[in-house]
C-alpha cells in the first residue's frame, strides 16, 4: 500500500482502498486475496493498460507487492452524480459551489430545485461518455457498471473520464476468472436503476448492449428538469430507493414496464430463450398491448418527453428522441450500439 504523509483516504470498500496523494494523483490498492465474483483487479488493470482514450481514466503506474495490486491515476475533482446534484438551484439560493457537501441535512428538501445545467454542456457531457463507451466496446469490453458515480468530471473543463473496470468483462480474453464465459456470464452486475432488463431476468449471454441501456438511464437523469429532494435524481427507472433504504429489482422492472410497456416474447426473444422463466411466468407471452414501439410516433414521442423532460431543449429533438428510444429497446439485437449511437448523435447535434 502507498505510504505518503500527505495522503488522504477518499474511499474504502470491501475490495479496495483509494487514496489521494499530494500530487493530484490517486492510488487504488486491492488485495488479490479475498476478492469475490465478479470483482477482478487483474482484469481491471489489463483493461486500463489497453484503454488509451481521452475519455477513459489514464493509468499512470501499476505495481504488485505482497499480494496487493496498486495503480495510480489522475485525481479528478468530482463524479457525475455529485456534479449533477450541484446543478440544481432553489429560488432562494444564488448558486451552489461545485464541490458543496450535499449531505448537510439542515438544507430543506421540500422545495423544488431547477436544473440549471445548460443543454449545450449537457450534450457535451453525453457526447464524451458515448465516445469513451464506444472505444471500450470497440475493444470488446463490457463495462458492466455504467453509472454517474463511475463517470468523473473535471468541473473546470467539463472533461469526462470513465472509471472503475473492477467488474468489467473482456470478451477478447480466452479464459476468465470465476469460470465466466461469453454464454455464461455473471448476471448479478451493474447497479440499481442502471441495470439493463436482461440482467434482471438472468440472461447470461448478455453483451455490450447492457452498457447502452445503463447510459440511457443516466441520460434521463441529465435530462431532468427539476427535483424535489437532494438525495435522488429521478430517472425513467425507479427502484424505490427514494422511499426505501435500498432499491429493488422488482420495483425497477415494474417501473420500466410502466414507462415502456411489456413486450411480447417475439419482441424480446433473449429473455425467453436464455433468461429465467420469471418473465413469462409473471407477464405472459403476449405483452400488455402498451409496448412503446407498437405505438404511432406521436405517442412514442410523448412518452419519450415524459422520460426525458428536457428533450425539447435539443434543437432536433424528435431525431434525438428516436436515438434515445433505440437505446432502450428490449431486444438486444435491435438495441443501438454505442458506435451507432455516437455516429447518430454527432449527425443530430451537428445538423443545421
Image (spheres, rainbow, N blue to C red):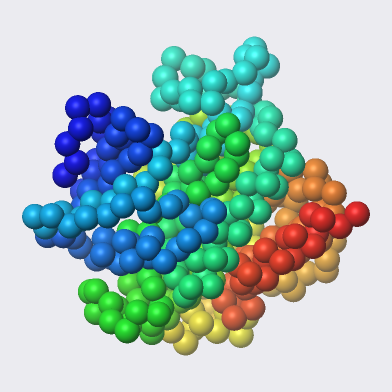
Left-right relation of 103 to 338: left
Looking at the picture, tell me which residue is in the foreground, 168 or 57.
Answer: 57
Q: Quadrant of residue 103?
A: top left
Left-right relation of 11 to 328: left
Left-right relation of 13 to 60: left
Q: Is residue 246 visible?
A: yes
Q: Residue 121's spot in the image, x, y percent?
A: 69, 40
Q: Is residue 234 visible?
A: no
Above or below: residue 101 compared with residue 127: above
Q: Residue furthest right?
A: 352
Q: Residue 277's spot in the image, x, y percent?
A: 41, 80
Q: Residue furthest left?
A: 66
Residue at 64% across, 65% down: 327
Quarter of the figure with the N terminus: top left
Above or below: residue 89 compared with residue 56: above
Above or below: residue 138 compared with residue 222: below
Number of numbered discs: 0
Residue at 61% across, 85% down: 266
Left-right relation of 157 to 251: right
Residue at 27% across, 30% down: 8
Residue at 42% across, 19% down: 104
Q: Residue 73's spot in the image, x, y percent?
A: 37, 46
Amino acid at each position: 500500500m502507498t505510504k505518503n504523509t500527505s495522503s488522504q483516504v477518499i474511499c474504502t470498500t470491501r475490495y479496495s482502498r483509494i487514496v489521494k496523494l499530494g500530487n493530484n494523483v490517486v492510488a487504488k490498492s486491492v488485495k488479490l486475496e479475498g476478492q469475490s465474483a465478479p470483482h477482478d483487479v487483474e482484469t481491471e488493470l489489463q483493461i486500463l493498460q489497453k484503454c488509451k482514450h481521452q475519455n477513459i481514466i489514464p493509468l499512470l503506474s501499476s505495481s504488485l507487492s505482497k499480494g496487493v495490486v496498486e495503480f495510480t491515476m489522475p485525481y479528478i475533482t468530482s463524479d457525475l452524480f455529485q456534479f449533477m446534484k450541484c446543478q440544481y438551484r432553489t429560488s432562494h439560493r444564488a448558486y451552489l459551489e461545485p464541490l458543496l457537501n450535499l449531505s448537510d441535512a439542515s438544507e430543506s428538501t421540500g422545495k423544488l430545485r431547477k436544473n440549471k445545467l445548460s443543454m449545450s454542456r449537457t450534450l457535451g457531457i453525453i457526447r464524451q461518455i458515448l465516445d469513451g463507451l464506444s472505444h471500450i466496446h470497440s475493444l470488446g469490453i463490457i463495462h458492466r457498471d455504467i453509472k454517474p458515480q463511475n463517470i468523473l468530471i473535471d468541473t473546470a473543463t467539463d472533461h469526462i473520464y470513465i472509471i472503475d473496470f473492477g467488474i468489467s468483462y473482456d470478451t477478447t480474453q480466452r479464459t476468465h476468472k470465476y469460470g465466466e464465459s461469453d454464454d455464461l456470464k455473471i448476471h448479478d452486475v451493474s447497479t440499481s436503476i442502471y441495470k439493463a432488463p436482461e440482467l434482471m431476468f438472468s440472461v447470461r449471454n448478455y453483451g455490450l448492449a447492457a452498457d447502452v441501456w445503463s447510459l440511457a438511464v443516466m441520460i434521463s437523469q441529465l435530462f431532468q428538469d427539476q427535483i424535489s429532494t437532494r438525495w435522488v435524481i429521478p430517472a425513467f427507472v425507479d427502484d424505490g430507493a427514494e422511499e426505501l433504504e435500498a432499491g429493488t429489482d422488482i420495483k425497477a422492472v415494474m417501473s420500466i414496464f410502466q414507462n415502456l410497456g411489456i413486450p411480447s416474447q417475439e419482441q424480446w426473444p433473449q429473455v425467453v430463450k436464455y433468461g429465467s422463466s420469471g418473465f413469462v411466468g409473471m407477464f405472459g407471452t403476449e405483452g400488455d398491448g402498451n409496448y412503446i414501439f407498437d405505438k404511432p410516433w406521436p405517442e412514442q414521442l410523448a412518452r419519450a418527453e415524459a422520460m426525458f423532460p428536457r428533450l425539447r431543449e435539443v434543437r432536433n429533438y424528435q431525431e434525438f428522441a428516436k436515438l434515445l428510444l433505440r437505446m432502450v429497446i428490449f431486444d438486444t439485437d435491435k438495441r443501438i450500439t454505442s458506435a451507432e449511437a455516437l455516429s447518430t448523435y454527432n449527425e443530430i447535434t451537428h445538423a443545421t
